[in-house]
Amino acid sequence: MPRELVLALTSVAGSTAACAAHGDVATLDTVRAAHAIFADAAPRAGGTVVKALGDGLLMAFPPNRAADAVAVLREAQGSASALWKAFDARCEVQVKATIGTVLCGPIGPPGDVRVDIFGNALNRLFKLAPGDLALTPELQAALNG
């Protein structure tokens, strides 16, 4: 079903090098702690974690809470980056966010269908240049509108 959402992706620059240096177990502990920061923050803006993507997350927020979403993403990015930097100074949490219409619902291979998000707005978000908090022009317009 098509739905307009604020979408956010997180990733960790430097996490591959950190994992090689510190090992899988210690790195996964840091991933889990950073995920918890975002998972705790998202509901404050009506958002939810859709899924984990390795060291990153895909989150969705209602469009009428776009400003709140950006505020909690900024706060969580700072806290999660501090956590990662304490683990390995090379690491920095990056967040990309947009607003757009996507398909929401059961997606996946037979036997592993889950509620997920699919669509061009998400595809374009993955292609957005990284930054501490990178916002698409569409989201900037929604915030300024």
Image: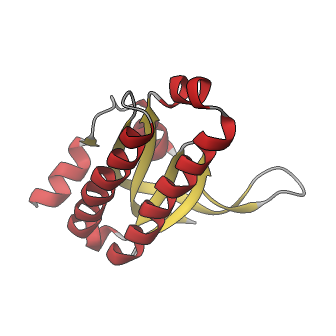
Residue 128 position by quadrant: top left
Residue 14 position by quadrant: top left
Residue at the extreme left of the image, as rendered: 144
Kindly identify the residue that appears in the image at 39 percent across and 49 percent down.
Answer: 83
Q: Is residue 22 left or right of residue 120?
A: right
Q: Is residue 111 left or right of residue 36?
A: right
Q: Position of residue 47 (x, y in %)?
A: 42, 70
Q: Position of residue 125 (x, y in %)?
A: 41, 40
Q: Position of residue 88 (x, y in %)?
A: 43, 33
Kindly identify the residue that appears in the image at 63 percent across and 59 percent down.
Answer: 116
Kindly identify the residue that appears in the image at 47 percent across and 54 percent down.
Answer: 34
Q: Position of residue 79 (x, y in %)?
A: 32, 55
Q: Is residue 23 left or right of residue 3?
A: right
Residue at the extreme right of the image, as rendered: 111
Residue 105 seen by the camera: yes
Q: How many marks?
A: 0
In the picture, the quarter occupied by the N terminus is bottom right
94 and 84: which is toward the camera = 84
Residue 36 against residue 137 in the figure, above or below: below
Q: How is the image coloured?
A: secondary structure
Residue 32 position by quadrant: bottom right
Residue 118 seen by the camera: no
In the picture, the quarter occupied by the C terminus is bottom left
Kindly identify the residue that appears in the image at 73 percent across and 62 percent down.
Answer: 114
3 and 133: which is toward the camera = 133
